[in-house]
Amino acid sequence: MNASSRWFSVFAGMCLAVQMAWGAEAPVIRARTELQLSVFPPIQLVDSEYDVVGLRLGLFSMNHDVTGLDLGFLNWTSGDELALQWGVLNKTTGRFAGVQFGLVSLAGNGFVGWQASVVNLDSGKSVGFFNGAVNASLESGVGFQMGLCNYAKEFTGLQFGLVNYAQKMVGVQIGLLNFITSKETLPVLPIVNASF
């Protein structure tokens, strides 16, 4: 081993020690593929623990992280996803960034982008445009919710629908019934409600 290789090994070891001391997770290196074809797990081209960077296509696809185009009946991502996703049921356990189309779209740990499904359900921090029959931001949301029923624990932006509900709101609600439960005066109003 030459001197530069030794110094690199020492430096890499020190970085890993500092990272472990601070409690940060060490990066996980997983196998990845450019193409995933599946009927259902385990009948798929590669194992569910693989990351997909490219195209995922199947009836029921399950992978860790997905980046690219994700098309199928049931799309399940156990990690994070950066994609254009279309399916009947789209579920991302981690963070999602991109566009989701389907009957039901779920983002487990935050969402950035556009959700256009019949039901859109987001945990964590969500930012974007959400249009569906039911839109729900279970933690905090920023942007525009448009649907029959819009719900947010905390929301900044515009809610437009028949029924709009937010525990805390910085913005405007337009609809038949509008609820902002943190407001002391007139927390429920027809047509328009606002809080700033």
Image (tube, helix red, strand yellow):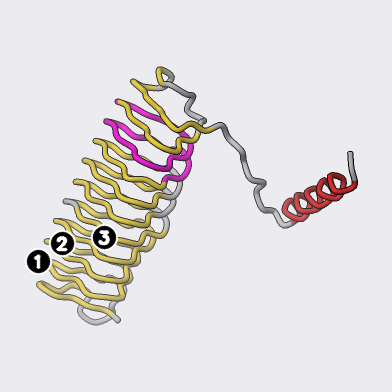
The kind of residue tagged 3 is Phe
* Vertical order, 138 against 180 (above or below): above
Q: Secondary structure at mark 2?
A: strand
Q: Nearer the viewer, residue 27 or 180?
A: 27
Q: Secondary structure at mark 1?
A: strand
Q: Is residue 147 left or right of residue 81?
A: left
The kind of residue tagged 1 is Leu
Q: Residues within 10 Å of mark 3 (few under 14, many from 20)?
A: some
Residue at 34 percent across and 40 percent down: it is 69
Q: Assess whether residue 108 is covered by the magenta stretch.
A: no
Q: Is residue 63 left or right of residue 8?
A: left
Query: Which numbered marker is on residue 176?
Result: 1
What span is colored magenta in the figure? 59-81
Q: Secondary structure at mark 3?
A: strand
**Quarter holding the N terminus?**
top right
C-alpha separation, residue under disc 2 versus residue under disc 3: 17 Å
Which residue in the structure is indicated by mark 2? 163
